[in-house]
Amino acid sequence: MKNFRIIDFDTNRIYGLDILRSFAILFVVYGHGNGMLPHRLSKILNAFFFDGVTIFFVLSGYLIGGIIIKQFVHTDISFKKIKQFWIRRWFRTLPNYFLILSVLCILNIFFRDNFKLEEVTEYFYFSQNLFRVHPEFFPEAWSLSVEEWFYLLLPILLFIFSYFFKSYRQLIFYFALSLITVVLLYRCYIYVIKPPNNEQMVDDYFRKQVFTRFDSLMLGVIGAYCNFFMHDAFKRYKNILFWFGIILFLIVQLLLPKLFQYTSFYNCVFSFYLTSLATLLLLPFLTEIKSGEGLVYRFFTFTSMISYSMYLLNLTIIQGWILAKIDFDSMFPNSNLDVIFKYFSYWILVFLLSTLLYKYYETPMTSLRDRIK
């Protein structure tokens, strides 16, 4: 069993959150690979597919919110504290992102006609979907810009509004509720002025723009707020909240899509919020699962640790630049084996390359942040 530990496990990890993060990335990888499967099979499996990116948003808001609350409540908010927060966060996210982005730019320069580097420079400062539709180049990067802008703006806004509140408890609570409300109203406004008439418009103007998704991250911050300031209640009601979350997930996934079209007001404005709320309700229970054992524990912990690398590699790199260059049809003529082989190759490559990226690049780069004071 020790051989399974290709990477070392951090004993300070929270196993319950690793489970949630693992399911989120597995949903994402499955969703991105869904097009490889026969239509009938993928349609059946979609009933068990949840929005992994929204789960990631809530989990990120929960963890980042917890860090900010602990730092700012125990000591006054200062630019030095904000800078330390940014350094630690960016050493976790930016090295991997810029590596993959640079690789994609190099590949396109050498192998794609009419590729212009200046057309993708906005990806280097996360403005590609700030005020417009996300471009086709590196399509999965849309969620990363949502998170990076959130990490940048949240501590600054809390710092500014701290002058108007007597306590950080009031500040965080009212700021979170206000931002969630503003985002919901903003999606309502977009729906009124630009009602979507197809699924692509829903993705372009509601699902994949920066400011339309801040509420998911902010609900995670609400979870961190409850865990810090209302810890006893957060822990006491964990079981009932967990089952409410599961039920809400099932309603959002199985019932509401049958009642509302993809372009409906509900789907464009409230579906993201309900999925985020369902995720939030799971957090009290999962936060209390500190550790585990056996192969299942190792799998979820391992998958959680390499999840960021999996997200960056699975679609554009593995599907677009590796699998797309292999002629599976000629390898298995007049057979369905090409679909099976391609699909399993996809999953194997995702785990293999993500492990290598995590072990030999992401981990060393993340460790550098401890050297910067």
Image (tube, rainbow, N blue to C red):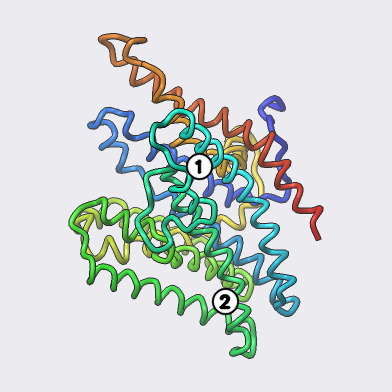
**Residue under numbered circle 2:** 157
Depth order, front residue of 163/114: 114
* Structural crowding at the residue carrying mark 2, measured as other residues with C-alpha within 10 Å and reported as few (<14), some (14–19) or many (≥20): few
Q: Residue placed at 56% from the left, 40% from the top?
A: 102
Report the Cα–Cα distance between label 2 and label 1: 29 Å
Depicted 39 relative to depicted 160: above or below: above
The picture places residue 316, in percent across and down from the top left corner, at 44, 36
Q: Residue placed at 18% from the left, 57% from the top?
A: 197
Depicted 200 relative to depicted 364: above or below: below
What is the secondary structure assignment of the residue under circle 1?
helix
User: Residue 195 is drawn in which quadrant?
Assistant: bottom left
Dividing the image into 4 quarters, which one contains the N terminus? top right
Q: Residue placed at 39% from the left, 25% from the top?
A: 324
Q: Residue 64 carries which label?
A: none
| For marks 2 and 1 on the same chain, the one whose residue lies earlier in the sequence | 2
Q: Residue placed at 50% from the left, 25% from the top?
A: 348
What is the secondary structure assignment of the residue under circle 2?
helix
Amino acid residing under circle 2:
Leu
Single out the mark in the foreground, 2 or 1: 2
The picture places residue 209, in percent across and down from the top left corner, at 39, 60
User: Residue 208 is drawn in which quadrant?
Assistant: bottom left
**Residue under numbered circle 1:** 311
Depth order, front residue of 41/99: 99
The picture places residue 175, in percent across and down from the top left corner, at 52, 79
* Structural crowding at the residue carrying mark 1, measured as other residues with C-alpha within 10 Å and reported as few (<14), some (14–19) or many (≥20): many
The picture places residue 113, in percent across and down from the top left corner, at 39, 32
Q: Are marks 2 and 1 in contact (CB under 8 Å)?
A: no
> Does residue 207 appear in this view?
yes
Amino acid residing under circle 1:
Tyr
